[in-house]
């Protein structure tokens, strides 16, 4: 929230300066623009901008939800594997738990290092270790092996989905169009005025702030791991790692 407020303030300060400069230098143009019907063209621009942004936000929100669900599914699969592997023979149980702890530790470390959207050889090695354990159990463990294989499949699928969704971004041309439309909407709002300068500032600032906020929302949704108004964190992984490494699970 503090990041969002700071970004809004960074917008408001220069906007206020530009607003007063425009009204000082182009007051005659502002008065004529209202009489000549520019407000109608401005309304059309606002409608087009709203439609574009609505489409973009809907698409980006779907991607964000899919990504967050894949993260939750990955965490749930790790917990499920941990619980089922506890019923395995002592050595196999210890090996499986070690691989799962290492997996969580690596995910948190790579996430914090900004490599959350890249496939890691170290993480793949831990998964290969788990595959080896499952292959050894399949001949003797029966139902337990089937449960572990199911949980392992869910884990690898959730990881693949997380990586895939992490690399999905808005096309650059579409992002540029949205930003251009936003800038156009803000600039044109400066040339549409009412008689009272203070009321004019309030309404113009409100319109510009709305347009700017929509761009912030789109940008945050397109960068789900970067700190912003909302973003995905490692809290779920860290919490599970603490839970599994507590004395109660040893």
Image (spheres, grey):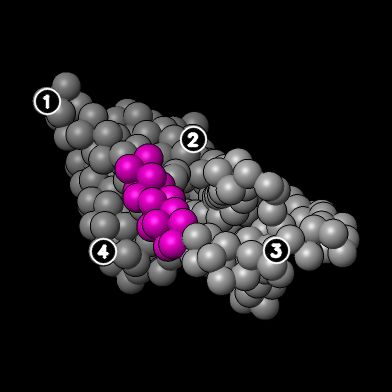
The residue that disc 1 covers is 247
Q: CA distance from mark 4 to mark 2?
A: 33 Å
The residue that disc 3 covers is 30
The residue that disc 2 covers is 147
Query: Are the two marked residues, 3 and 1, in contact with CB atoms closer than 8 angstroms?
Result: no
- Left or right side of 42 for 120: left
Residue 115 visible to an observer of this rendering? yes
- Residue 142: percent from left, percent from top: 47, 35
User: Badge 1: few (under 14), some or many (20 or more) residues near its Cα, within 10 Å?
Assistant: few
The residue that disc 4 covers is 113
Q: Farthest residue toward the left?
A: 247
Query: Are the two marked residues, 2 and 1, in contact with CB atoms closer than 8 angstroms?
Result: no
User: Badge 4: few (under 14), some or many (20 or more) residues near its Cα, within 10 Å?
Assistant: few
- Residue 173: percent from left, percent from top: 67, 77
Look at discs 2 and 3 and give the one toward the viewer: 3
Picture quadrant where residue 114 is located: bottom left
Q: Nearer the viewer, residue 208 or 147?
A: 208
């Amino acid at each position: 929230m503090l990041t969002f407020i700071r970004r809004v303030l960074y917008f408001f300060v220069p906007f206020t300066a530009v607003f007063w400069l425009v009204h000082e230098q182009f007051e005659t143009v502002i008065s004529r623009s209202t009489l000549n019907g520019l407000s109608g063209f401005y309304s059309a621009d606002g409608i087009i901008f709203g439609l574009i942004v609505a489409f973009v936000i809907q698409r980006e929100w779907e991607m964000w939800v899919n990504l967050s669900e894949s993260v939750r599914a990955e965490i749930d699969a790790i917990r499920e594997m941990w619980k089922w592997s506890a019923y395995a023979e002592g050595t196999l149980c210890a090996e499986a738990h070690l691989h799962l702890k290492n997996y969580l530790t690596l995910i948190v470390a790579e996430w914090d290092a900004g490599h959350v959207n890249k496939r890691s050889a170290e993480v793949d090695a831990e998964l290969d270790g788990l595959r080896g354990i499952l292959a050894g159990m399949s001949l003797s463990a029966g139902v337990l092996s089937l449960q572990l294989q199911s949980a392992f499949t869910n884990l690898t699928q959730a990881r693949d989905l997380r990586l895939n969704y992490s690399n999905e971004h808005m096309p650059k041309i579409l992002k540029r169009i949205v930003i251009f439309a936003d800038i156009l909407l803000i600039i044109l709002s400066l040339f549409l005025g009412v008689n009272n300068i203070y009321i004019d500032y309030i309404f113009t600032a409100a319109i510009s702030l709305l347009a700017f906020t929509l761009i912030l929302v789109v940008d945050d949704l397109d960068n789900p791991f970067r700190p912003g108004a909302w973003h995905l964190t490692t809290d779920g992984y860290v919490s599970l790692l603490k839970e599994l490494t507590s004395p109660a699970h040893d």
